[in-house]
Each structure stands twice: as structure tokens, then as C-alpha cells.
Image (cartoon, grey):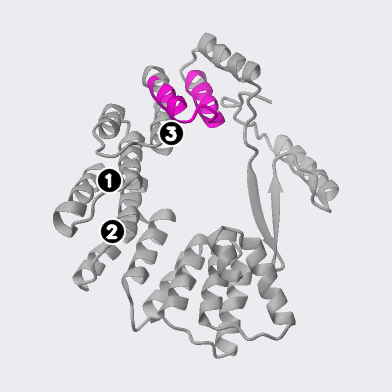
Amino acid sequence: MIDGYVRVNRFKEVLELFREMQTWNVRPDEYTMVSILTACAHLGALELGEWIKTYIDKSKIKNDTFVRNALIDMYFKCGNVEKAARVFNAMLRRDKFTWTAMIVGLAINGHGKEALDMFSQMLKSAVAPDKITYLGVLCACTHSGMVDEGTNFFSSMSTQHGIEPTVAHYGCMVDLLGRAGRLKEAYEVIQNMPIEPNSVVWGTLLGACRMHKDAELGEVVAKQILDLDPENSAVYVLLCNVYAACNKGESFREVRQTIMDKGIKKTPGCSLIEVNGDVHEFVASDASHPESEKIYSKLDEMIKELKSAGYSPDTSEVWID
């Protein structure tokens, strides 16, 4: 049951079932612990993840490579780079997944150079990388602005390791070039893909068009996304933001009117926070939390304090109520 919930991304249910398991005095094994740590990682539940680590040690549950890999992933996804590195350094046996967890974890936490150094160590250790490893490597290059290095790594995937790039790898290249302002090259990457680009790849380029204020290319890209996914509300949001950034008021109003006419609703944002081992989920404009009245009252108080301190919100991308 726990493994099944993990597979369908129902992570809160994973933790609820684990608590029930403890109530029934059912002793978990190392496989259960990997699933629980995975749930903690995706929920950002660091406090609970730490408790699980202590539970593993005290209960003398087999602390093998799989468990330690899950610990590394959990620490990175919760933003604790130091503790992830500590687990890695203490490991006597490391497999491909250990190295990959380190490379991806360092990359997503903004430590691009360290991620690439880790990749070099992996190769020196005669451990062959896989598709996920290369996603981490390309992500590291993207967040560090290393365009030439990223291009070289992308080429070496197939030439040195026989790994054929997937849509996700091409998406990384589009992101890498797009962030660097090389929009034409990013567009050419998509046009020359040997596989069909999806709306996520096109959406990455549209985001870059907004960042670098290229309304002309943005229109072309938006059309491609809507051909693939006509109900994609995020496209209209991004296109509005492109026009707003380029001061194209008339085009902005036209898209906004289209949004109103079609009755398009922006998907509400969602966030999670862990308090005393419990994970609380919040959706924008939601009042279902049992303490929502107190929460909104506190938010109002914080907003007043921010305004009195001279804070002024950036409303350049506020496009619809």
C-alpha cells in the first residue's frame, strides 16, 4: 500500500499509512523506509525525515545503499546540502544512483560547479552515468550559465556513453540557451529535434521569451503550444506576461479579453509546510484549513508590517484576478 501511494504521488497518504503501521506495531523494513523517505523528500518534510533517520538507527533497520540514497535525496529536496554530503561521504559502497542523487541534488540547489566536479569523480570511479545523471549535469550547467560546457556534455551523452537524449534532455538544452538569451539557437534545437517536442519544451522557450522580452518569437511559440494543448491556460498567462514585459498594451488586452471570453481560469498555486511533523497543504484563496481564519489574520498583519517597512510588490505580471 505504501509503495503504491508513492508510485501515484500520494505522499501525504504514505505518511498517514506509516503512522497507522506504527499503531498496529508492525515493524517496517528497509524497503518501507525508502518509501517513507521518498514521501518526506517530495513533501519537504525535513523534520519528519530526520526522525525517520533516527528511527532507522535506533530500530537497527538495515541501513543499506538504497536507504542511504533515499536519505541523500531527502536532504537535498529539503534544501540541506551539508547533511546530504555528510551521508555520501560516510558511505563505503556507492552505486550509480548514489552518484546521480548527489549530482542532481547539488544542481537543483544551485551548486553547479560542485555537481560537475561530482560528475568527474563519478567517471573516474568507473561508474557509468545514465539518462538521469545527464539531466543533473545539464541542470547544473543551466543554473550556472555554462552554455558551452552544457553543449559539450549534451553531445558526449551519445558519443561517449551511447545514451540517446530524451525530450527532457532537449528541454534542458532549450532552458540552457534560453536563459542565456540565445533564443534563436534554442528555437533551432526544438526544430531539429528527432522526436516530437511536447508543450513543456515549448513552454520553456516561451518563458525565455518573457525573460528576454521577445514578443515576436513568443507569439510563434505560444501558437505551437496551443496546437498541442488547446486547453493550456498557462500559455495565455505567459503570453500576457511577454506582452506586459515588452510594453505591448494592445496585444496584452487582446489576450486578456480572450481569457475572459473563453472563461479560462489560472490553476491555483499550492504550497506545503511542515509543522511539528505534520504536513499542511495550502491552495491559493483556499479557506478549508481548520485554522484558516488565524492564518489569514496573520498574513494581513505581515502585509501591514511589510508596507510600513517600505516594501512595494512587483505587479508587472499581475494579469488577471
Query: Does dot 2 land on a helix, a strand or a loop?
Result: helix
- Badge 2: residue crowd in 10 Å (few <14, some 14–19, many ≥20): many
Which is nearer the eye, 74 or 109? 74
**Magenta segment, which residues?**
220-243
Identify the residue at horizontal 21%, vertical 43% (top origin).
148
Residue 206 against residue 7 in the figure, above or below:
above
Alpha carbons under labels 2 and 1: distance apart:
11 Å
Q: Name the kind of residue labelled 3 in the image.
A: Gly
- Badge 1: residue crowd in 10 Å (few <14, some 14–19, many ≥20): some
**Placement of the N terminus among the 4 image quadrants:** bottom right
Secondary structure character of the magenta stretch overall: helix
- For marks 3 and 2 on the same chain, the one whose residue lies earlier in the sequence: 2
Which is nearer the eye, 72 or 189? 189
Residue 234: x %, y % from top left: 54, 31
Alpha carbons under labels 3 and 2: distance apart:
27 Å
Q: Which residue is mark 2?
A: 116
- Badge 3: residue crowd in 10 Å (few <14, some 14–19, many ≥20): many
Q: Which residue is mark 1?
A: 146
Residue 47: x %, y % from top left: 63, 69
Q: Is residue 177 one of those drawn in magenta?
A: no
Residue lying furthest top: 250
Identify the residue at horizontal 38%, vertical 55% (top origin).
107
Q: Kindly indicate the quadrant of the structure image that contains residue 87.
A: bottom left
Q: Which residue is mark 3?
A: 203
Q: In the shown orientation, is residue 143 left or right of residue 303?
A: left
Alpha carbons under labels 1 and 3: distance apart:
21 Å
